[in-house]
Image: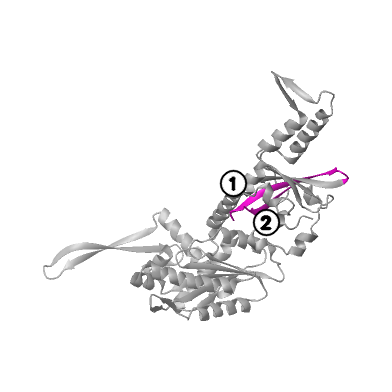
Amino acid sequence: MLTTLGQTCHGSLWYGVSWAMWMTLLERLHRFGAAPSGAVSGRGASLSADDFTRLLSEHINDGVVIQDAEGHILWSNRAYERITGFSFAEIAGRKPQEFILPADRQISAREVADFRYDPSDAMFQGFEIVQNRRKSGELFWAQLSFGFFEATDRHHVIVTVRDVSEEVAANQALTQAKADLEQAVNYDALTGLANRRKLMVFLGAALRGATPDKDGVGVLHLDLDRFKDINDTYGHAAGDAVIKQAAQIMGRRAAPLGMAARIGGDEFIMVRPGLKSSEALERTAEDLISDARDPVLWDGRYLNYGFSIGMAISEPGMSRGQDLIQNADFALYEAKARGRGCWAMYDRPLRKKHRARRGMAEDLMRAVRENGLDFWYQPIVDLTACQTVGIETLARWTHPTRGIIAPEEFLAIAE
């Protein structure tokens, strides 16, 4: 096998004259040379088959090398010298592995000496793309194809060499562009965590793979404590530093089977599939809160932040990831009401509270649509001048079953 020529890429179709076309031309010229005339005449010119063969080898854009079965170079054309920088005088009798390999792919003298072509090896039936080195030291990509023939009772190899550096560079650029697009579409630019789109795909798959009688899918909705104060006091650069450290913590805690995603400025979602119990999710929350006690060192200052966390575990048959996130979101509000650095689980009492709040929200939207809110007007009086200087409007909601509901109760829901 020719395992010493460098990185290979099989099965690619590249532009230009293929090996099969090259061999066909040579075969036809040799067959023509065996004809009685041995030449083609026209407009006063007469060229033999050997002349055509020589012209083809000298003017074809592809490099052509003839080697013996051990890989020694017996002949090369001008294109090969142009591509590699090596003249035939410099490489006659040598093996390409002695001078063409990049520095990081050099092989031992013993391996070079032991090399033999194997015509039955599948790698020689098509193309291969390898990285080679010119005489100047410049690296380039070469497309190689091989043909075997017998002459003077010995096996010989014709190798065609094409410089495909531009094609490889274009292909690599396209691959990188696709990778960059994939990164931009699915990942947050600042933290490298998944974005909302990637999160929803992952969460949906996790819910579909959950077993109703055993494993559940856990979601943690995290909000950064003191983030607004840090941003307002020190600027966005400081806020970004906090977000990055928080993201690193979540990424470590989510690995290897879960996912952490940034869904807003200082809002994150972590997914933990395969949960056996709520205690496992609670331990994760405790670990995250503990990790966040280490301040961020930024510009010579220590910035203290923390996590408030709301959690929810999927119920049997749950298929909508957004429903699970909403449950965790409601638990997050409960956690923040308890103070900084707290967590709350969306359990049965919280579910009951959530349903009541959701029902009140629906009633409030209906009241707004149907003009069900009352407005009480209260004068503002300047006692010094004994004059009315303004009017304050007070919203009141008369619920059909609960009676008058005070603003402090329904305005939070409206917000």
Where is residue 78 shown, x and y percent of the image? 66, 42
Q: Nearer the viewer, residue 342 or 300?
A: 300
Secondary structure of the residue carrying tag 1 is helix
Q: Nearer the viewer, residue 378 or 204?
A: 204
Q: Which dot marks residue 272?
A: none
Which residue is rendered at x = 39% and y = 55% of the image?
371
Q: Please tell me whether residue 146 belongs to the stretch shown in magenta.
A: yes
Sequence-earlier tag: 2 or 1: 2
Q: Please tell me whether residue 248 belongs to the stretch shown in magenta.
A: no
Where is residue 102 shown, x and y percent of the image? 64, 58
Vertical arrangement, residue 306 with respect to residue 203, above or below: below
Where is residue 347 shown, x and y percent of the image? 58, 74
Vertical arrangement, residue 254 with respect to residue 137, above or below: below
The magenta segment: 127-153
Residue assigned mark 1: 166
Decide whether the magenta segment is chiefly helix, strand or loop.
strand
Q: Nearer the viewer, residue 116 or 181?
A: 116
Q: Which dot marks residue 99?
A: 2
Q: Nearer the viewer, mark 2 or mark 1?
A: 2
Which residue is rendered at x = 50% and y = 63% of the image?
263
Coloring basis for residues: one colour
| Crowd tier of the residue under label 2, counting other residues whose Cα lies within 10 Å: few below 14, some 14–19, many 20 or above | some
Q: Amino acid at mark 2?
A: Phe
Q: Nearer the viewer, residue 44 or 229?
A: 44
Secondary structure of the residue carrying tag 2 is loop
Tally the marks. Answer: 2
Alpha carbons under labels 2 and 1: distance apart: 22 Å
Vertical arrangement, residue 78 with respect to residue 402, above or below: above
Q: Quadrant of the N terminus?
A: bottom right
| Crowd tier of the residue under label 1, counting other residues whose Cα lies within 10 Å: few below 14, some 14–19, many 20 or above | few
Where is residue 82 shown, x and y percent of the image? 62, 45
